[in-house]
Image (cartoon, helix red, strand yellow):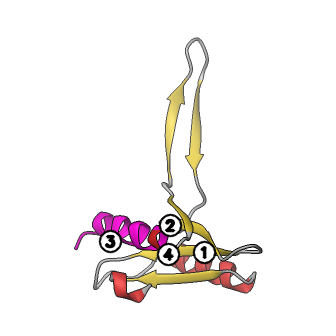
Amino acid sequence: MSETALVNACLIFLRSQGVMAWRVNTGAMTIRARGHRTRFVRFGMVGQSDILGVVGRPSGRFLAVECKRKPNKPTWAQSQFLEEIRAHGGLGWVVYEIEDL
């Protein structure tokens, strides 16, 4: 299963369980506004997980899910992001298949 397919399957599963979850894109690009100079824009944080969300009502806990295809491993930045989420009381996982959720 591709990482894109895994992300989509995880989103479907999480939403079926009542979890508010969404796909997050990260990256950067140079843009040029009409009549203005070019500028560099970054989307998301370096290492940010593929899926973010909130689990549980009414108080909720932050959720971060990094989807990987075996045998790929999270980058250092992705691992640090998940550790930071957990250190602040959130839930953070790396999943290789839907059953990992």
The residue carrying mark 2 is 51
Asked if residue 38 can be seen in this view, the reply is yes
Q: Which of the marked residues, 4 or 1, is nearer the chain's N terminus?
A: 4
Q: Residues within 10 Å of mark 4 (few under 14, many from 20)?
A: few
Q: CA distance from mark 4 to mark 1?
A: 13 Å
Left/right of residue 15 with respect to residue 52 in the rendered view: left
Q: CA distance from mark 1 to mark 2?
A: 8 Å
Whether tag 1 and tag 2 are in contact, CB under 8 A, the answer is: yes
Q: Which of the marked residues, 1 or 2, is nearer the chain's N terminus?
A: 2
Which residue type carries mark 3? Leu
Residue displayed at 57% across by 74% down: 64
Which residue type carries mark 1? Leu
Q: Secondary structure at mark 4?
A: loop
Q: Secondary structure at mark 1?
A: strand
* Place of residue 69 in the rendered image (x, y in percent of width and height, measured from the top left): 30, 78
- How many numbered discs sit on the rendered protein? 4
The residue carrying mark 3 is 6
Is residue 17 inside the magenta stretch? no
